[in-house]
Image (tube, helix red, strand yellow):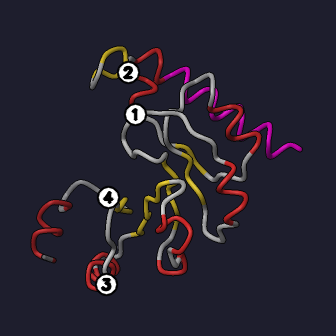
Amino acid sequence: VSDSIEADLGGVGVDAVQVHGELSEALLDEFRSLDLGVIKALSVGSEEFASFDEERVDAILVDGPVPGSGTAHSFDGVRERGFRRPVIAAGGLTALSVTAVIGAHDVWGVDVASGVESAPGVKDPLRVTEFVEAARRSFVARAAT
C-alpha cells in the first residue's frame, strides 16, 4: 500500500492526511514513514467517538452523525469527551454558524464543504471568502479573551 500512497501523494505537497473509517496500525505506520501528520475523523455520538485512542494521531476532526452530509449538529460532545489533541470542527458549518462554534468550543480549526456551495459540488467564491473571514475573526476574538 505504501507505493500506492506515495504515488497518490507524490508531488502535491501534502503534510497531513484525514482518515475516515478504520485506522489500522499498519496504515498509521505507513503514514508516519512518509512523515505525514494524521487527522482522524470521528462522528459525534458514534462508539468510535467515545473510545478512539487519540494519542495515536495528531488531530481529531469531529463531524456529525452522518459524515459528509453537511448537516449541522451539536459540538457539545467535544467538551464532554475532553480531547487532548487539537480538534477540527466539521459538519454543517457556514459563515453564519462558524462564529458560534469557534466561540463556544475549544476547536483548533474548522472544515467546510457544502456550507460554501451555491449548488451541490459547486463552491461559491463569495461564500468561501465570507466563511474564511468569519472564522479568522472568531479565532482572533477568542484569542483576545
Disc 4 secondary structure class: loop
Task: Of the two numbered discs 1 and 4 on the same chain, state the one appearing first in sequence.
Answer: 4
Displayed quadrant of residue 134: top right
Position of residue 18 measured from the top left corner of the image (x, y, whole percent): 37, 59
Q: Is residue 138 above or below residue 144?
A: above
Say what amino acid the circle numbered 1 marks.
Ala
For disc 4, the neighbor class at 10 Å (few under 14, some 14 to 19, many from 20) is: few
Judging by the rendered image, the residue that carries numbered circle 2 is 117
Say what amino acid the circle numbered 4 marks.
Val
Task: Tell me the residue at 72%/48% (across/down).
Answer: 105
- C-alpha separation, residue under disc 3 versus residue under disc 4: 17 Å
- The answer to whether mark 2 and mark 1 are in CB contact below 8 A is yes
- The answer to whether mark 1 and mark 3 are in CB contact below 8 A is no
Please name which of the two marks, 3 or 4, marks the residue nearer to the observer.
3
Q: Which span is picked out in magenta?
A: 129-145
Residue 29: assigned label:
3
Disc 1 secondary structure class: loop
Judging by the rendered image, the residue that carries numbered circle 1 is 113
Displayed quadrant of residue 9: bottom left
Task: Of the two numbered discs 2 and 3 on the same chain, state the one appearing first in sequence.
Answer: 3
Q: Is residue 10 above or below residue 28?
A: above
Disc 2 secondary structure class: strand
Judging by the rendered image, the residue that carries numbered circle 4 is 14
Task: Of the two numbered discs 2 and 4 on the same chain, state the one appearing first in sequence.
Answer: 4
Position of residue 131 measured from the top left corner of the image (x, y, whole percent): 55, 26
Task: Of the two numbered discs 3 and 4 on the same chain, state the one appearing first in sequence.
Answer: 4
Task: Tell me the residue at 48%/48% (across/down).
Answer: 63
Say what amino acid the circle numbered 3 marks.
Asp
Looking at the image, which is closer to me, 71 or 27?
71
- C-alpha separation, residue under disc 1 versus residue under disc 3: 29 Å
Judged left or right of residue 140, residue 86 is: left
